[in-house]
Image (tube, grey):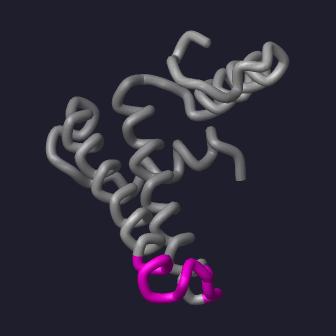
Amino acid sequence: MNFEEYQKKSRKTALYPNLGNNFPYVVMGLCGEAGEVADKLKKTIRDDGGEVTDEKRAEVTKELGDVLWYVAQLATELNLSLDEIAELNIEKLYSRLQRGTIGGSGDDR
């Protein structure tokens, strides 16, 4: 499956208030799901010495799927293409790699 297909298919499951005009709702959901990923991995550090078990990996996989869903909905809400977002991101990262600016901080490096 590619990003375009995922974006279209996932939209069929988008049931929230003001669909098509509610990016704040989607942003809050995205933050919540990203927090769940972080929480599961934090507990791996606390409880399992940082070892990611198959069970924990499966849990994180599900949560990352939820993050992806919210990213797709946010892109759709803002009339953006996930394919284009991914392509532009790789171009930016490769440019930084070629210029030796992968490390550091700032959007415009």
Left of 22 or right of it: where is 79?
right
Left of 102 or right of it: where is 100?
right
Q: Residue at x 36, y 66 (%)?
A: 36
Pick the front one: 45 or 71: 45
Q: Position of residue 100 (x, y in %)?
A: 78, 19
Query: Toward which corner of the image does residue 24 lie, by quadrant?
Result: top left
Looking at the rendering, in which quadrant would you find the C terminus?
Answer: top right
Give the answer, above or below, for where 61 lies relative to 96.
below
Left of 99 or right of it: where is 17?
left
Magenta segment: does it hold 49?
yes
Q: Position of residue 16 (x, y in %)?
A: 21, 51
Magenta part of the protein: which range? 43-54
Instruction: Looking at this view, name the residue that lies furthest to the right.
Output: 98
Q: Residue at x 42, y 81 (%)?
A: 46
Pick the front one: 52 or 79: 52
Query: Toward which corner of the image does residue 57 lie, by quadrant?
Result: bottom right
Q: Position of residue 65 (x, y in %)?
A: 51, 62
Q: Residue at x 70, y 46 (%)?
A: 2
Left of 39 or right of it: where is 8?
right
Q: Residue at x 28, y 43 (%)?
A: 26
Q: Position of residue 49 (x, y in %)?
A: 54, 84
